[in-house]
Image (cartoon, rainbow, N blue to C red):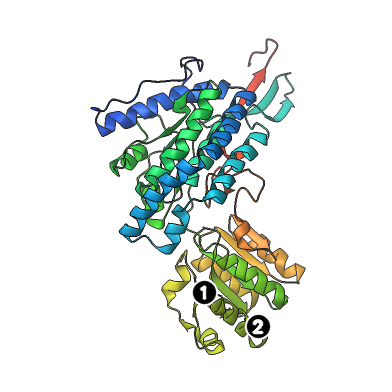
Amino acid sequence: MTLSSAPSSTPSASTPSAPALSASASLVETMHELGRRARLAAHALGLASSEQKNTALFTAAKVMRAQSAAIIAANALDMQAGEQAGLTKANLDRLMLNEARIEAMAKGLEDIAHLPDPVGRVLAQFERPNGLMIERVSTPLGVIGVIYESRPNVTADAGALCLKAGNAAILRGGSDSFHSSRAIHDCLAEGLRAANLPQAAIALVPVRDRAAVGEMLKGLAGQLDVIVPRGGKSLVARVQEEARVPVFAHLEGIVHVYVDRAADLDMAKTILRNAKLRRTGICGAAETLLVDRAIADQSLKPLVSMLIDAGCAVRGDDMVCKADARATPATTEDWRTEYLDSIISAKVVDGLDEAMNHIDTFGSHHTDCIITQDQAAADRFLREVDSAIVLHNASTQFADGGEFGFGAEIGIATGRMHARGPVGLEQLTSFKYRVHGSGQIRS
């Protein structure tokens, strides 16, 4: 993945306001103008002080709390439209905002502000035999486009993370969260104004037209440096297929919990229930349960029955269906399905090797967990399972940038280039080399 750098010419950040986009402009013109303004803002942000960026975030958090009633009212419009459009229970849960979720967004902004500034860090420093002093220094990526569905909180998380890392952001929320995202974006804009930073630093695409996504995938005439998709399989697949700029993407979260022969049953039940049912609509929710055949006689029924009793449908193999008659037979497609709902697939496997083979065959390299008291088995699982996040004796719902101490995340990257796992501040920077000489020339 090659990340291009931003042009160096831009007006001063002391004039943050910009004229409104022309109502008569075509979609292409509108999107390209967003890109041009974001590029200018990116240069200003790259030079902004930590104090300025933190002021913007603290102010946005304060405004968000003050405007919580307005945000909830805007969200009610989206929820009503979503229900009428037949959105699934999981998608409605992702869309819904309440006082607690707004407070969580505001706190997330403050948490990001409290984190060390990732820009300008000296990552390495060394001297060459000829006396040249070379430093590797962190720099912003430039302009980041974020395309997301349903979750309006991504507006706050993505905007704040890009800002703190010195990047301009162009946010394209889903049409189902249109009003909610606008209300949240208004709070971010207030923060930028308070910090005397350009409002184009966090831009929200002003139209619902799906063609706007296509323009972003083309790169906005060279103004976008990276695209981050947050949404369903079809959206992410389209972005990966059509994007002309680098992509930080996770295709989907086919998340596994493997209960090993050396697992503590009570611990397994507690972790599994949380991993599946705490919030079913997030990408870290467990979608497949694997149980070691060596303990199936003792542990399979308690695990499966616990899930069903808690309201989770179980689709399993023959042994699972025999363990609890309420389970239904699984198909091959179930093993590769991200339900994002109160449904889980379940299978008995012949030990650790078959469990890891199943994960490699059907998984999405997102998050996978082993529950065991056997440290050697845990070590093998953590070493050999090729996922962005692997856990031992902990719920998969910890697959979250906030839980990692990143303040928030812009997404969970499952690729292997540049960023992997929760994409936080550090992953939103690149680097350059600074070379200090004293008159050296090359022979």
User: Is residue 251 or residue 188 the one in the foreground?
Assistant: 188
Residue 228 vs 118, above or below: the answer is below
Distance, label 1 to label 2, CA atoms, is 18 Å
Which callout, 1 or 2, points to the residue nearer the camera? 1
Residue 47 vs 173, above or below: the answer is above
Q: Residue at x 54, y 32 (%)?
A: 163
| Quarter the C terminus occupies | top right
Q: Residues within 10 Å of mark 2 (few under 14, many from 20)?
A: many
- Residue type highlighted by circle 1: Cys
Residue 77 vs 122, above or below: the answer is below
On the image, the x and y values in percent for residue 401 come to 60, 48
| SS at badge 1 | loop
Does the image show residue 348? Answer: yes
Q: Residue at x 73, y 75 (%)?
A: 264
Query: In the rendered image, which quarter is residue 242 located in?
Result: top left
On the image, the x and y values in percent for residue 29 come to 28, 28
Query: In the rendered image, which quarter is residue 349 located in?
Result: bottom right
On the image, the x and y values in percent for residue 268 come to 67, 73
Say whether marks 1 and 2 touch (CB < 8 Å).
no
In terms of sequence position, does the residue under pointer 1 or pointer 2 come before the other? 2
Residue identified by numbered label 2: 299
Does the image show residue 385? Answer: no
User: Is residue 328 or residue 367 the one in the foreground?
Assistant: 328
| SS at badge 2 | helix
On the image, the x and y values in percent for residue 114 come to 67, 35
Is 292 situated left or right of 374 in this image?
Answer: left
- Residue type highlighted by circle 2: Ser
Res 312 label: 1
Res 281 label: none
